[in-house]
Amino acid sequence: MENFNINIIVIDDNLKETDPLLVQLKLSFKDAQITLKKNAKDGLEYILSNLNNKMIVLLDYDLGADEPNGTEIFLKIREKTALLYVIIVTAKLIDEISNKELATYINKDALAIVDKTTSLNDKIALVKNAIHKLDVRVDCVLEQWISNHSEDEQNESYLTTTLGKTYTLKDVLAEIRQGTDFGKSMERKILLLAIDLLTRGKKQIDD
């Protein structure tokens, strides 16, 4: 499994860098950037300033008094991107979370909701699953392909729309990640092109 430029952000007011979860994340995903933020403001600022990167967020449901809860933070993330994977971590029992909030997690595509007593192995397995999803997602495969081009090639005009707007390779990636109409259109076209290439009779592919 490839941890290509992955940011794993933990937002939790009770954790320290020496917490077993942080230690195990660093041991399990040595090529990833592991970041701990202890309040909603710092966590959101970090996420929103890194939207062009692949990210997985482990988000504490209860960040303490005078702090927004995990649902509010989750909704603020979803206002900006639908592509970031969020794992909600809660000390509450699931049946203590309101049906409205649970519906929000389902409808807005939270990756998972786990109890804080869930084993480290199970939490790491969820992150591994999220990384796999990232590895096969259009924007992430495109990012890896772009990285094989020189910096000059990445920043030069790559395509022009019928309205005359030009995009670099980096622009295309950013548009897909931010879920713009252009980005969604490009994502669909890339998938259709991939299917077209696969159905042209090639019977052998690289492992």
Image (tube, rainbow, N blue to C red):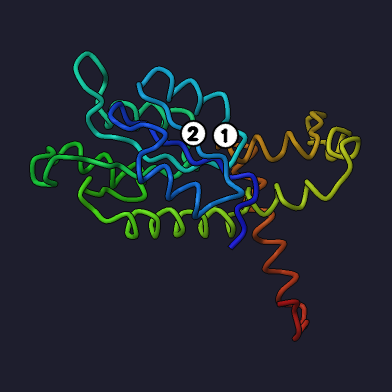
Residue plotted at (70% across, 50% down):
142
The C terminus: image quadrant: bottom right
Query: Where is residue 33 drawn, in percent x and y?
Result: 57, 40
As rendered, which of 1 and 152 lies closer to the eye?
1
Q: Around disc 2, counting alpha carbons within 10 Å, would you say few (fewer than 14), some (14 to 19), or many (20 or more)?
A: some
Residue visible at 49% across and 33% down in the picture: 35
Say left or right for 207 vs 65.
right
Residue 201's x, y, as percent? 77, 83
Q: Which residue is mark 2?
A: 35
Q: Residue at x 28, y 29 (%)?
A: 14
- Closest to the camera, between mark 2 and mark 1, is 2
Which amino acid lies under the numbered mark 2 shown in the image of this protein?
A: Thr
Q: Locate residue 54: give its quadrant.
A: top right
Residue bearing the label numbered 1? 178
Left or right: 151 in relation to 6: right
Q: Is residue 24 left or right of residue 68?
A: right
Rendered location of residue 158, percent (x, y): 85, 40
